[in-house]
Amino acid sequence: MAGLADVSARTRGQVAAAPREPASLGLEALVARARSLGQGDRRILLGIAGAPGSGKSTLAERLVTALGADAVLVPMDGFHLADDELERLGRGHRKGDPDTFDADGFLALLRRIRDGGPGPVYAPRFDRNLEAAVAGSIRVDPAVRLVVTEGNYLLLDEPPWDAVRPLLDEVWFLRLDDDERVERLLRRHVAHGRSPEAAREWVLRSDEANAALVMRDEGRADVVLAPPPLPVEAAERVPHSV
């Protein structure tokens, strides 16, 4: 795992001086790395970032499943603003943009999780069938040592999102071929009810604009991963990605 070995050499939240070559690591190696992060005497927050369709949710879910009771997944997209509020703000056509999330609420949750306490912390989960967040869906018990969060904007270097990176002990960035990403996004939108034409319009107008933002700050990650393409069925069943 040479690509991950030099993580501690950089200060958390520091911008990388130059882009790095992506590491190609299998799930077993990533699980081992995640497990090692949670071996200390305090709770660790691991972030998984990447452009829409890069496989963040699938990797995060597989990590947490492999780690069992030692880890819990708290996705960023539980902080989507409700559709009614987006319509009130005139942002319904750009759902998924940075300003269509409750970023301050996400930050507050990360701080609570990081600080710990005698009782559990509850987090919202985004229900793709409802297209809405459901409060209190994820329980973070005091004994959990590793909390994994995933989302588009964990590395975004503009307020208020720039306050997220210093709260995370380590961030992995997933880099995927753009053509493959776009195909995954098209399949996902069609699976959730859009026509192929509407899916393509949304992806090229909204998702890809957000992808450009996300990829701009790749250098703030501790390691860049170039994952092998996921099977189609895995890419299409992702419930949380934006």
Image: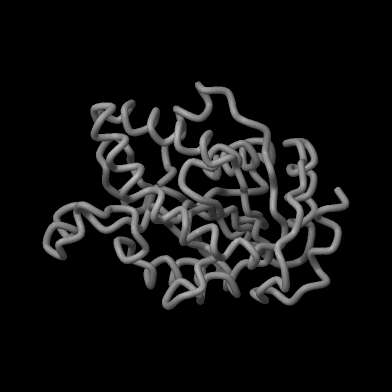
The quadrant in which residue 31 appears is: top right
Q: Position of residue 59 (x, y in %)?
A: 60, 40
Q: Exactly how many numbered labels are in the figure?
A: 0
Residue, x 34% and y 59% (percent of image)? 97
Up the image or down, 216 lies above or below 184; here it is below
Q: In the visual, does 19 lie left or right of 148?
A: right
Q: Position of residue 98 (x, y in %)?
A: 37, 63
Residue at the far left: name it: 88
Up the image or down, 202 lies above or below 183; here it is below
Q: Position of residue 213 (x, y in %)?
A: 46, 61
The scheme the figure's colours follow is one colour
Q: Nearer the viewer, residue 126 or 165?
A: 165
Residue, x 61% and y 61% (percent of image)? 218
Q: In the visual, does 53 lie left or right of 25?
A: left
The quadrant in which residue 44 appears is: bottom right
Up the image or down, 125 lies above or below 157; here it is above
Residue, x 66% and y 63% (percent of image)? 221
Q: Position of residue 215 (x, y in %)?
A: 54, 58
Residue, x 51% and y 76% (percent of image)? 163
